[in-house]
Every structure is written in structure tokens, then in C-alpha cells.
Image (cartoon, rainbow, N blue to C red):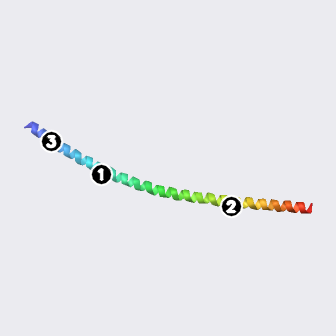
Amino acid sequence: DLRQELKGEMADLRQELKGEMADLRDELKGEMADLRSEMAAMEVRILREFGAFRDEIHRDRRAAQRQMLFVLVVAFVSLLVAFATG
């Protein structure tokens, strides 16, 4: 009977569609897991680079502070010498 044949074909198509959807879902889960791993690795690289940048800024600031202190000491000594000889 044609009705039974159509019902059987529809059931087969439904099962095939369910299988394909399950495959797509599994593939998507795998892709999302890969993406999460890549994002975690990127976060580690960004934090490492930011830490290196922060350390470089601190080194530069300390060097600038030392230079400024040296200039101030030289200026102070120069003033003392000027007052002492003036």
C-alpha cells in the first residue's frame, strides 16, 4: 500500500536526518572545544606579553627616576658650590 510505503520512507528520512543532526552536533562540540583551547592559549600569550610590557614600563620608570635623582643631586651640589664660592 502506498500510504505504508510513504510512512516507511518518511521514517527512514527522519532517522537519517536525526543521524545527520547528531553528527553535526558532535562536530560542533569538537569545533567549540578546539576554539576554547585556542582562546585559552591566546589568553596565556596575552597575559605573558602584558606582563613583559608591564615589566619593561617599570624598568623604564625606575631608570627615569634614577636619572632625575642624579640630575637633582648634581644641581644641588652645584648650588652648594656656587654658594660656597660666591
Q: Which mark is residue 9?
A: 3
- Disc 1 residue crowd, few under 14, some 14–19, many 20+, Cα 10 Å: few
Q: Earlier in the sequence, mark 1 or mark 3?
A: 3
Say which quadrant the C terminus sits in. bottom right
- Disc 3 residue crowd, few under 14, some 14–19, many 20+, Cα 10 Å: few
- The location of residue 82, given as percent across then percent down, is 88, 60
- The location of residue 50, given as percent across then percent down, is 55, 56
Q: Nearer the viewer, mark 1 or mark 3?
A: 1
For label 3, the SS is helix
Q: Earlier in the sequence, mark 1 or mark 2?
A: 1
Name the one closer to the observer, 72 or 9: 72
Q: Quadrant of residue 4?
A: top left
Q: Amino acid at mark 1?
A: Asp
- Disc 2 residue crowd, few under 14, some 14–19, many 20+, Cα 10 Å: few
Q: CA distance from mark 2 to mark 3?
A: 80 Å
Q: CA distance from mark 1 to mark 3?
A: 26 Å
Q: Is residue 23 left or right of residue 8?
A: right
For label 2, the SS is helix
- The location of residue 48, given as percent across then percent down, is 52, 59
Q: Is residue 79 left or right of residue 4?
A: right
Q: Quadrant of residue 60?
A: bottom right
Marks 2/3 in contact by CB < 8 Å: the verdict is no
Q: Earlier in the sequence, mark 2 or mark 3?
A: 3
Marks 1/3 in contact by CB < 8 Å: the verdict is no
The residue that label 2 is drawn on is 63
Q: Which mark is residue 26?
A: 1
